[in-house]
Amino acid sequence: MCLEDRPVLEPNAAGIDVGAREMFVAVPPGRDEKPVRVFATFTEDLERLTDWLEQCGVRTVALESTGVYWIPLFEILEQRGIRPCLVNARHMKNVPGRRTDWHECQWLQFLHSVGLLRAAFRPGQDVCAVRTILRHRNELVAAASQHVQHMHKALTQMNLQIHHVISDITGSTGRAIVDAILAGQRDGAELAKLRDPHIKADTETIRKSLEGNWRPEHLFTLGQSRDLYRIYQQQIVNCDLEIEKMLQGFAPRIDPGERPLPPDRKRNRAGSKRRRKNGHPHPEFDLRTEAYKLFGVDVSQIPGLEENALPLFSEVGRDMSRWPSAAHFVSWLALCPDNDISGGKLLWRGARRVKNRAGHLFRMAAYALHRSLTPLGNYLRRMKAKLGPQAATMATAHKIAVIFYTMIKNQVEYDETIWDARDAAREKKLQARLKRQAKQLGYELVPIQPQAA
């Protein structure tokens, strides 16, 4: 069956080729004398575009995911009751002969009408609002780290080696010493007295590291970098406060008063509490408790996801019904290999190279388990020996994503005892294989009897 003979599944579908300055819009033939029109991207023009779609009886629209230019139109269409379908431009790139915007929108309209386009996942507007602030916060953190590097550079140019003696120049000792230097203190012995008692380096080592060449141009750059770092830190705190305010608007799935938060097994295992954020005005705000209320389960108990509960909420939300099964979820995350088969022959097998932020979070969680003593850490090390580092990280991220999906959809807590049964089954399978191999070689394996004490 050729494309032109396919049945129309969406008779009221339109297609829009999104651009930075112009929107090329195509409606079904026969709905207007000019089925293809061009609109500017000003808000007034986008409203006129939506009015024209309503006059033509359009109920759903396919838009190309071009940068961030589609977001204003997407939101207007949602507000007016027209279902937007955000599609990946890569799905149409191999079609020849339709390379102009005028033809592209018509091709989008046709593909959408015959059901050949799949909409990209986009959480609700309230979750997207949290995602916007959280992504902006990550950019602020990256910018602040650059100014820490600038402070390191200025200190190195003056041959002040304090950032090599203490682990963190932005800690209490580092901040106090840098502030004293910028205030005019040049005596290394006096600066060394600002040492925190928990610092491993002794006072004499710190004093020697604070002898250098006090050039004014480097002091100037050190001061500016210190001030910019503080500004970014304050803006990060402001982002935290805004996120906390947004989280209060979500209806909790569970009341911690009626169903208390499970004990933090990782904190008990570590033996110490997590360090609170510097400068945060609300130290009583517990992110783990808020994530527990949002998801209804404590996803922070999954090894590797201790600090990723809120970022995952902002990327995937908490409605797992958008994916029929865990297999659909990990496929969307690009955490499973794809098979390219033609004529019964496997041409290519590997993971899709897509930029999925949620999938990246799961991969980072898996990467952090190399030295973990948890069952997932054991699984990662076992897969490294079998598949190599990259494939092992992907396989572990796959397993973490399945656990995350199952916990939220079925509202069950993480249970490490399930791994015991699987380990026992794997050991039994290993014993059976060894016995079979020994029998093939003419040997018989006999278990060693434990010696009496």
Image (spheres, grey):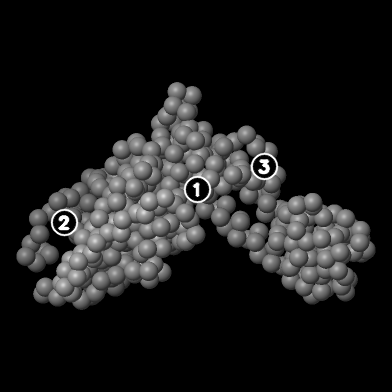
Please tell me whether mark 1 or mark 2 is closer to you in this view.
Answer: 1
Q: Residue at coordinates 78% horizontally, 61% vertically from top-left?
A: 201
The location of residue 269, given as percent across then percent down, is 53, 45
Q: Disc 1 and disc 2: Cα gap in Å?
A: 44 Å
The location of residue 315, given as percent across then percent down, is 42, 50
Q: Quadrant of residue 443?
A: bottom left
Amino acid of disc 1: Glu
Q: Which mark is residue 306?
A: 1
The mark nearer the N terminus, 1 or 3, is: 3
Q: State whether residue 18 appears in this view.
A: no
Relative placement, left or right, of 132 versus 80 is right
Relative placement, left or right, of 269 versus 397 is right
Q: Secondary structure at mark 3?
A: loop
At label 2, counting other C-alpha atoms closer than 10 Å, the crowd grade (few under 14, some 14-19, many 20 or more) is some
Please tell me whether mark 1 or mark 3 is closer to you in this view.
Answer: 1
Judging by the rendered image, the residue that carries numbered circle 2 is 114
Q: Disc 1 and disc 3: Cα gap in Å?
A: 20 Å
Residue 40 vs 273, above or below: the answer is: below
Q: Quadrant of residue 91?
A: bottom left
Front-most of residues 129 and 31: 129
The location of residue 416, given as percent across then percent down, is 38, 44
Q: Which mark is residue 280?
A: 3
Amino acid of disc 2: Val
